Amino acid sequence: MATEFDFVIVGGGTAGLVLAARLSEDPNTQVLVMEAGEDLANDPRVNIPGMWTQLQSGATDWQLKSVPQDSLNGRSVPIAQGRLLGGCSALNAMNFVVPAKEDLDAWAELGNPGWDWDGFSRYLNKTHKKGITDGNKLDDDDGTIQVNIPKEETKWPQVWRDTWAGLGYPTDNDPYSGDIHGAVTYPDAIHPEAKTRSYAGNDYLGLARGRANLTVWTGVPVDKILFDNTTKDAAVATGVRYTTKDGNTSSVRARKEVVLSAGVFHSPKLLELSGIGNAQLLQSLGIDVVVDNPSVGENLQHHPLSVHSFETVQDGQPGFETMDALVRQDPDAIAAAVNAYKTTQSGPLSRSNCNTMAHLPFPGLDTEAGKHDAQSIVKTLTQSETKYPIGNSDNDTYTSAATALATRSLTDPSSASGYYVFIPCPAGPPEPTTPGSVPKTHITIATLLTRPLSRGSTHITSAEKAKPPVIDPRYLSHPADIATLARHVRFIRKTLTNQPPLADRLVRNTTADDDDTPKKDTDKDDLDLDRLTTRLRDTAAASTLYTSTCAMMPRAMGGVVDSELRVYGTRNLRVVDASVMPFITRGDTMATVYGIAEKAAEILGRE
Ligand SMILES: Cc1cc2nc3c(=O)[nH]c(=O)nc-3n(C[C@H](O)[C@H](O)[C@H](O)COP(=O)(O)OP(=O)(O)OC[C@H]3O[C@@H](n4cnc5c(N)ncnc54)[C@H](O)[C@@H]3O)c2cc1C
């Protein structure tokens, strides 16, 4: 077995497999991918789109959770992260969400030339191939991940669009434009004809699987980067140490580079275990300090969300079916879904079921009262003591850039502060049914905060390799975050769900604690913001999108990697995954991670 390669990629996930496919295009380059999880390429839970929720537990998930969160009344939140070949791209919801232009332009302005929309689009375009939308073939481009907007099989998406149109928002957004206001239907990363998941584990790795110069090892967790410390000006990465399948410790050498693509929690963990991080922390754990950089594992970002389920009208009108029976695991419903999938590649198993979305500016920004309200939150941005990332000397620059981005989302009608998702099923466990009664049906609307100012961290608390990192996302800890999210909750309950045609299909809000007939929320005065805010502390949830723990920006600003993704203070060591985003994108993150890896492959390939 070879023990020396040109590139050693740690983590065969979303980014890692893009790198593997691209770097091994050169037959003279030997590439190794080391993945802690296993290859489940033939598992229906990976391949059948509608089964995407099934892998978020057990051996295919790292089973992480946050520490109890003060800002969520002491609740601890589970954090799903894929532990299998393909990483999160093998178990995520497949929504292919191109980042906003303003996301990328803000990255570049921090001191990352070439990462703006104009520079990054080229790499984003390489990541995907637009498939078929409602029977029409879109593109013959040669991108890799297959994306397409599934055919609409119910009337709910049209109801969603008509409702937003009734409120005066555009509904004809191009999901690939990077510039979306109002309702939008995002593509799913699904093969358009077979209706199977398109992800890094099949479409990127599939380009390269047979190449003699690419080696993929699964079931081999890496726990340390090895350095040659004899060079004075930088620690030179020479390879990694890992645990073999039979439990022994072994190592491999990298002739050119070690690339960490272990994801937002494990890339910083590996840096810290290897001596790169906050010197005080490392010394307290008995780890030799290789590079003192207190920003490693800081700056954790994430979209907090609030979820609302509504019982729907059951009047026998076709087109208003929901997935309640599937959630209840009704055998007839399961049989019908399996049959539709097998015979015509249609039905709820053929899709993500959550690609009907919207981006909304600050609610009420078109009125004087709304503008005034937004300004009251903007004031709290500058008054807040928050400075981040913690532990570096020049974070004023980063803090003002983050504040400017958040201010824009609060004051500019062309920017979004809320990201809405429509799902045709209940949010929690099904309501109990009584014998003889007709089971109820539900839809769910979730709203996510696009520009969170709260920042968290992930760190090791022991030199023991098997110990999970301690994750403190500090969800909704910034006062502006909870204030803004509360406005979006009020918008859902008072405005969106009272607007026809959606209002005509809803009976009651089953997640509200204060109201039996929330369709009449507009008549009520108990939707005051204090009450909604208090309730958010008990009910707000966490989306599955996390970024920024090894942020790409100048080191003095809190950066861990430079704009070519090199780890500061080292040579031959890069990070390429969701952890390098200096600001989280305003929507889902997978498409951006694919783009980051495409760009990184080009950078690595030319060196
Ligand atoms: C449940 C869920 C649903 C989501 N839905 C969407 C969606 O619909 N749309 C969207 O855009 N985004 C979605 N996301 C987010 C998106 O999938 C991630 O942001 C993105 O895939 C992260 O890619 P990555 O390369 O950074 O990490 P990953 O894809 O997680 O890859 C990291 C890999 O490294 C491996 N690894 C970690 N530590 C080690 C180690 N020590 N040794 C060896 N290997 C290691 C892991 O097992 C994993 O395979 C979702 C995420 C989750 C969890």
Image: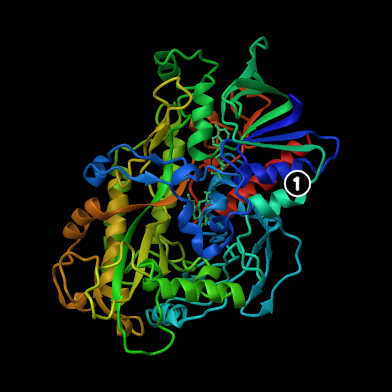
Toward the viewer: 364 or 587?
Answer: 587
Residue at 42% over, 29% down: 459
Rendered location of residue 408, percent (x, y)? 42, 56
Where the C terminus falls, by quadrant?
Answer: top right
Would residue 234 be seen by someone viewing this image from the given angle? no
- Secondary structure at badge 1 equals loop
Rendered location of residue 497, percent (x, y)? 30, 76
Would residue 507 be seen by someone viewing this image from the given angle? yes
Where the N terminus falls, by quadrant?
Answer: top right
| Residue underneath mark 1 | 209
Residue at 30% over, 68% down: 309
Query: Within 10 angstroms of label 1, few (less than 14), some, or many (20 or more) residues?
Result: some
Residue found farthest to the right = 28
Q: Is residue 503 left or right of residue 110?
A: left
Please say which color scheme the image uses.
rainbow
- The correct choice, above or below, for 366 with respect to 576 in the image is below
- The correct choice, above or below, for 576 with respect to 590 in the image is above
Residue at 36% over, 45% down: 78
Q: How many marks?
A: 1
- The correct choice, above or below, for 254 with respect to 451 in the image is above
Corner quadrant of residue 361:
bottom left
Residue at 51% over, 67% down: 180
Rendered location of residue 23, percent (x, y)? 76, 40
Hey, what amino acid is under mark 1? Answer: Arg
- The correct choice, above or below, for 263 with respect to 348 in the image is above
Corner quadrant of residue 85:
top right
Toward the viewer: 173 or 329?
Answer: 329
Q: Is residue 505 left or right of residue 197?
A: left
